[in-house]
Amino acid sequence: MTVHPSLQNYADAWTHAVEAIAELVKPLVEGEWNRATPCPSWSVRDIVSHVIGMETEMLGDPRPIHSLPRDLFHVRTDHARYMEMQVDVRRHHTAPEMTSELEYILIRRARQLRNENRAPDTLIPAPLRAEQTLETAYRTRAFDCWVHEQDLRAALGVPGNLDSPGAYVARDVLLEALPRVVAKEAGAPAGSAVVVDVTGSVEFLRTVRVNAQGEGSIDGTPSLGPAVTLATDWETYVRLACGRVRAAEVADAVKVEGDEDLARAILERFAVTPN
């Protein structure tokens, strides 16, 4: 059996991203594994540990039995604690141990994908003892791996793949959260519209419209009189939406037209990935 057609796009995006990650870290010497990345509080080693850990969970391997140190001050939520477990347990692993485990896990996951015969709506375990559909899991892993590939590229000074299959999965995931940011979190007024115009490797224009009940929706039709227009490049959009930079740090890369207070409120809440 092969991957279900509705899962194939995510499987391809995941494969492209994880193979890029493996190529990026394969030649690194020991000290380079400790380089800081744009992902808050995580090093190169930490990101690769996270990828390994999440892929082992997709394989159904048991989570490690491990107690987190009390001085990990960046770990503030249950979700962060869950994710940190797979990271902290590998913090003293050597470079050969890291690359060997990553290679082994990717071989096993590739075999799993080739033999996948479950329906996309099959429920499987999710973090924090929740459940998710297989399709959601595939999409999440493709998105997560592409974002972390970009973290590694930034840390190692090797830019690339901003228009790879994973980039388009990331676009869709990030845009899905935009109506909530504009309508609920930034409090855009009922009847208003906010336009986001992104150029670069991945180009798109989207309008978030807030209805009379204060609920947001998104479409690709331009608004004739938006309350705010935000224009930026794709890389900056990703860095903002994934919480890699604050709005003030990239102010020169974001052009704002319209209500400056609303624009500021949106940009301050633009990060949609969990901490």
Image (cartoon, rainbow, N blue to C red):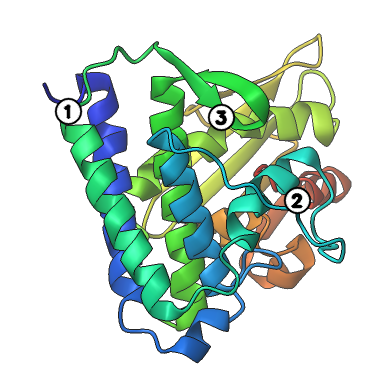
Disc 3/disc 1 C-alpha distance (Å) = 30 Å
- Mark 3 / mark 1, whichever is N-terminal: 1
Amino acid found under the numbered disc labelled 2: Leu
Q: Amino acid at mark 3?
A: Glu
Mark linked to residue 115:
1
Sequence-first disc among 2 and 1: 1
Callout 3 secondary element: helix
Where 48 sits versus 16, above or below? below
Q: Amino acid at mark 1?
A: Asn
Between the residue at mark 2 and the residue at mark 1, the CA separation in whole angstroms equals: 43 Å
**Residue at (78% x, 45% y) in the render:** 269
Looking at the rendering, which quadrant does residue 97 occupy?
bottom left
* Image quarter (top left, top right, bottom left or bottom right) of the N terminus: top left
- Please give the name of the residue rendered at 36% of the width and 62% of the height, measured from the top-left corner: 101
Above/below status of 85 relative to 132: below
Please name the residue that numbered disc 2 is placed on.
267
Give the answer, above or below, for where 147 lies relative to 47: above
3D distance between C-alphas at marks 3 and 2: 16 Å
Where residue 176 sits, quadrant-wise, is top right
* Residue at the disc numbered 3: 176
Query: Marks 1 and 2: in contact by CB < 8 Å?
Result: no
Which element type, helix, strand or loop, lies under badge 2?
A: helix
Ranked by sequence position, the earlier of labels 3 and 2 is: 3
105 relative position to 273: left or right: left
Please state the horizontal and vertical placement of residue 158, each as a whole percent of the image.
Answer: 38, 79
